[in-house]
Image (tube, rainbow, N blue to C red):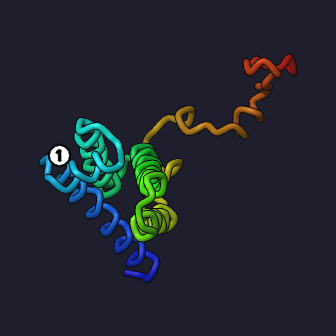
């Protein structure tokens, strides 16, 4: 195992474990997450919603293949952690409660950046090429955007 692979698996395992254990604590309706969410001003049912997404995100970054799902999971992890940092700052919590989610975000970002090609969107996934078409491929195909936000094919026939 090379250094990049070791760094990827270390950051990914840490991120996944943080989300799996945190999600499990939320789903078990443990007292600490319930009190913490109430302190932040969130309703109790929010713990169940976040717990579900945390567990699913932790699993998604661990399982092989499914690169599109992994992209969404990493995005959700980023939303969760930035939302946590902002929520703690908004209610005036100590700096440590704001910084910890941002440190976890850095670890998750390292996991995302270090992932092998087989776990990246656009890798050989068996998806049809049209499912992976980006804006530059659309532009090459002669589709132009108009000021109204709609798209139409150019008449370059």
- Callout 1 secondary element: helix
Pinpoint residue 67: horizontal percent, then vertical percent.
43, 49
Q: Nearer the viewer, residue 80 or 63?
A: 80
Q: Is residue 55 left or right of residue 12?
A: left
Q: Is residue 136 above or below residue 123?
A: above
Mark 1 highlights which residue? 27
Q: Nearer the viewer, residue 110 or 32?
A: 32
Q: Nearer the viewer, residue 112 or 80?
A: 80
Q: Is residue 146 left or right of residue 111?
A: right
Q: Is residue 106 above or below residue 143?
A: below
**Which image quadrant: the C terminus?**
top right
Pinpoint residue 68: horizontal percent, then vertical percent.
44, 44
Q: How many residues crowd around disc 1 within 10 Å: few (fewer than 14), some, or many (20 or more)?
A: some
**Which image quadrant: the N terminus?**
bottom left
Q: Is residue 121 above or below residue 130?
A: below
Pinpoint residue 75: horizontal percent, then vertical percent.
47, 48
Residue at 31% x, 50% y: name it. 39
Can see residue 70?
no
């Amino acid at each position: 195992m090379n250094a990049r692979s070791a760094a990827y698996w270390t950051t990914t395992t840490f991120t996944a474990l943080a989300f799996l254990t945190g999600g499990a604590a939320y789903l078990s309706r443990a007292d600490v997450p319930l009190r913490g969410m109430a302190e932040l001003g969130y309703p109790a049912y929010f713990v169940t919603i976040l717990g579900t997404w945390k567990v699913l995100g932790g699993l998604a970054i661990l399982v092989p293949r499914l690169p599109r799902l992994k992209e969404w999971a990493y995005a959700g992890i980023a939303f969760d952690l930035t939302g946590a940092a902002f929520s703690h700052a908004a209610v005036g919590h100590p700096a440590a409660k704001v910084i910890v989610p941002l440190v976890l975000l850095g670890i998750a970002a390292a996991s995302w950046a270090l992932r092998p090609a087989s776990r990246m969107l656009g890798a050989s996934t068996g998806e049809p090429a049209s499912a992976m078409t980006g804006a530059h491929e659309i532009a090459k195909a002669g589709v132009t955007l108009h000021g109204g936000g709609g798209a139409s094919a150019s008449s370059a026939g």
